[in-house]
């Protein structure tokens, strides 16, 4: 077990919470208690709960789960630019450290809200957590580089059609990483891979570039409960892929523990 190892992207979905008008489907019942077994099996002491798109701007389910995690938890929520300042302060005290922008179908916030929200959360030291089709990085690179907050990119760039590692869109993403204020989650290769399990060769080629050439900007995540995937991917196998992507145990440990501690503001882990 690596002290301070963190799962940087998972969702809690509970029966009974209302769906947003933008929701694409009813999420499965995936309570924090069920995730705990996965977390323990993987040897992960920390977790970042990310607001499910199905709940839109209603963060109650996420915040309830966050409260149960104590100091070992952080959260990423969804808010609009007019969110009251006292609500931001309350969420910060609870452990929220970012705002999610899902730019694929089902997202609650449009591109036009990106800069206003970033301006609201900058004084808190929060980040923007962005999921988009990676093919758009060349046209969005300058807009993203101008944000006054750190930027976290989901799922190996979420290239809906995995590109060659030297493609312009990959270069644009790597330029953002080189800027020193952008991070990338090495996660959910199954969402975009065309070659498929067990090694997801096409997405793994990208993940190796990120992990071996931008290790200080990488995070790892399970993406539990793997919404929309039947059967569910094996979380242990996904974590094992990180060792291959990193190519070095110390690099993998940095991605699992040191980088999340820095980004999400966790206390130093006891070794």
Image (cartoon, grey):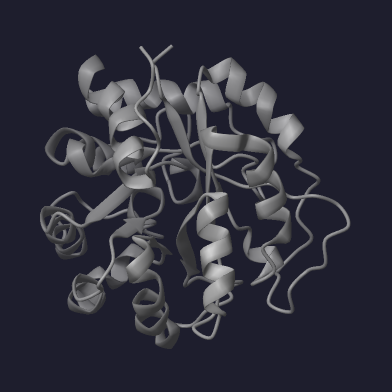
Residue 138 pos. (x, y %): 20, 73
- The count of marks equals 0
Out of 1 and 173, give the one closest to the viewer.
1
Residue 119 seen in render: yes
Q: Residue at x 50, y 70 (%)?
A: 104
Residue 95 pos. (x, y %): 52, 49
Q: Residue at x 29, y 37 (%)?
A: 259
Above or below — where is 259 with respect to 104?
A: above
For this view, does 40 lie left or right of residue 1?
right
Which residue in the rendered view is the most extreme toward the right? 16
Q: Image quarter for residue 77?
A: bottom right
Above or below — where is 35 with respect to 152?
A: above
For this view, does 52 lie left or right of residue 26?
left
Residue 105 pos. (x, y %): 57, 73
Out of 232 and 100, give the one closest to the viewer.
100
On-image quarter of the C terminus = top left
Q: Image quarter for residue 39?
A: top right
Above or below — where is 248 with respect to 158?
A: above
């Amino acid at each position: 077990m690596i002290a301070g190892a963190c799962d940087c992207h998972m969702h809690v979905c509970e029966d009974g919470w209302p769906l947003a008008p933008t929701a694409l489907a009813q999420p499965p019942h995936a309570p924090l208690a069920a995730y705990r077994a996965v977390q323990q099996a993987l040897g992960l002491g920390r977790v970042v709960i990310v607001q499910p798109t199905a709940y839109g701007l209603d963060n109650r389910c996420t915040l309830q789960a966050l409260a149960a995690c104590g100091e070992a938890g952080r959260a990423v929520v969804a808010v609009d630019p007019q969110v009251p300042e006292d609500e931001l302060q309350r969420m910060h005290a609870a452990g929220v450290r970012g705002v999610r922008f899902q730019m694929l179908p089902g997202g609650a916030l449009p591109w036009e809200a990106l800069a206003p929200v970033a301006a609201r959360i900058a004084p808190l030291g929060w980040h923007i957590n962005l999921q988009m089709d990676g093919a758009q990085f060349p046209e969005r690179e300058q807009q993203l580089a101008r944000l006054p907050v750190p930027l976290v990119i989901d799922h190996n760039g979420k290239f809906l059609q995995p590109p060659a590692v030297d493609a312009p869109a990959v270069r644009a993403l790597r330029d953002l990483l080189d800027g020193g204020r952008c991070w990338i989650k090495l996660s959910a290769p199954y969402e975009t891979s065309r070659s498929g399990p067990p090694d997801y060769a096409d997405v793994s080629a990208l993940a190796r570039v990120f992990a071996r050439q931008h290790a200080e900007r990488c995070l790892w995540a399970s993406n539990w409960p793997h919404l929309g995937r039947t059967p569910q991917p094996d979380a242990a196998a996904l974590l094992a892929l990180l060792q291959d992507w990193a190519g070095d145990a110390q690099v993998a440990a940095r991605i699992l523990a040191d980088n999340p501690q820095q980004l999400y503001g966790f206390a130093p882990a006891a070794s």
